[in-house]
Amino acid sequence: MKDHLIGRTETKGITTMNESETIDPRELNPLALAFVGDSVLELLVRQRLVEHHRLSAGKLNAEKVKYVSARAQFREEQLLEPLFTEEELSVFKRGRNASKASVAKHASPEEYRASTGFECLLGWLYLNGQLARVHELFGTTGSETSLQIDPGLIRCQTCVSAYISTAFLCGGTVTDPQKEYNLEFLTGRTNLAKDFEALLAEHEFAPHRTRRNGVNLIYVKSSASVERILAFMGAAEASARMNAQKAVKQLRNQINRQTNCDTANLGKTARANAQTTRAIRFLQEQGALETLPEVLQQAAAMRMENPDLSLTALCACFEPPVSKSGLSHRMKKLEALAEDLRRRLEENAEKEETK
């Protein structure tokens, strides 16, 4: 029996698709597109692995999982989304919004939905014959022999130095060290960026990698690493100038810190001296200073004679000199006595008012 409405043939309980019918990819369910896209991505990953790694089938499969899992696809989609056209972004969102409520074991709902949208986009591109665009998003045109660093080009330190310096001349920038320390390499190829980051890390240049405006960015931030990589590339003079500028900058910062510290200490000393002077003057006005022990009277007299000296400098004015802790204790005692006397006078005044 043939059912021409749905395009299938049933023969003895077996259902086969009517191959004469071709469905427009635009009419397909987003999850059907994702079904195709999942295979497209896996085939591309498998091809890349066997082209660049001599591994057993088991190890190849383990490596493949790192790139086709829902979490890995989510990271890939986040990197590629700025490159999507409006139409591609619309297809991606259709797939993401059509994703099932269930999630992968090792992925969050957000990651799972995004990975489904990414697979939907790959399936849509594949079924529309846009293989060149698929390869472009995947990081290859399909005709290139390699998009990774050829180990044969960097067999010695001189080769590595030449390779890095050439990469800098082709797509590198360095920021004015007067403002900040930053050296960058730019490339549109994600896999090449990963290899280049690994190359810099192997030589302990402490690189970082990110993506900005659809371009891969490998950068070095610390002053020491920037100086080392400049010297390594053969720009010894530039490295020396940066080191000299850094020394000047550090000296300037040290002077500023010392000045700020001295200013803060002067302010603190002035406030402390003023507080002690007010306490001594109050004791004098109330006739209480003469009743205090001789050591306190001596400390009060010395402070009133030298109101601007720091506590350390004031210690040297005594004969014999007193310790800083000892003089500090006497000053605090004078302040405490003045405060106690002021409190008692206020209490007495309140009692007089209530009578």
Image (tube, helix red, strand yellow):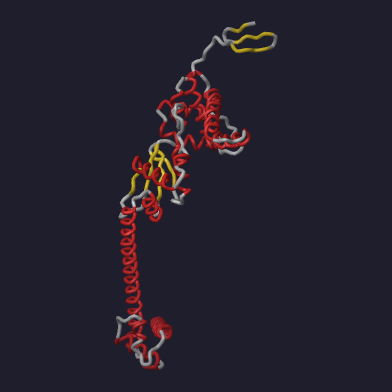
**Residue situated in front as seen by the camera: 48 or 92:** 48
Does 280 sit above or below residue 133?
Answer: below
Position of 256 with respect to 24 (left or right) is left
Position of 283 with respect to 96 (left or right) is left
Residue 273: quarter of image = bottom left
Does 321 sit above or below residue 126?
Answer: below
Q: Is residue 351 visible?
A: no
Marker count (numbered): 0
**Residue situated in front as seen by the camera: 52 or 311:** 52
**Quadrant containing the C terminus in the rendered view:** bottom left
**Residue situated in front as seen by the camera: 241 or 135:** 241
Q: Is residue 72 visible?
A: yes
Q: Position of residue 292 (x, y in %)?
A: 40, 92
Which residue is farthest top?
1
Q: Position of residue 224 (x, y in %)?
A: 40, 56
**Residue situated in front as seen by the camera: 121 or 142:** 142
Residue at 31% over, 51% down: 176
Which residue is farthest right?
12
Does 151 sit above or below residue 34?
Answer: below
Residue 295: quarter of image = bottom left
Q: Position of residue 138 (x, y in %)?
A: 47, 31
Q: Position of residue 272 (x, y in %)?
A: 36, 77
**Quadrant containing the N terminus in the rendered view:** top right
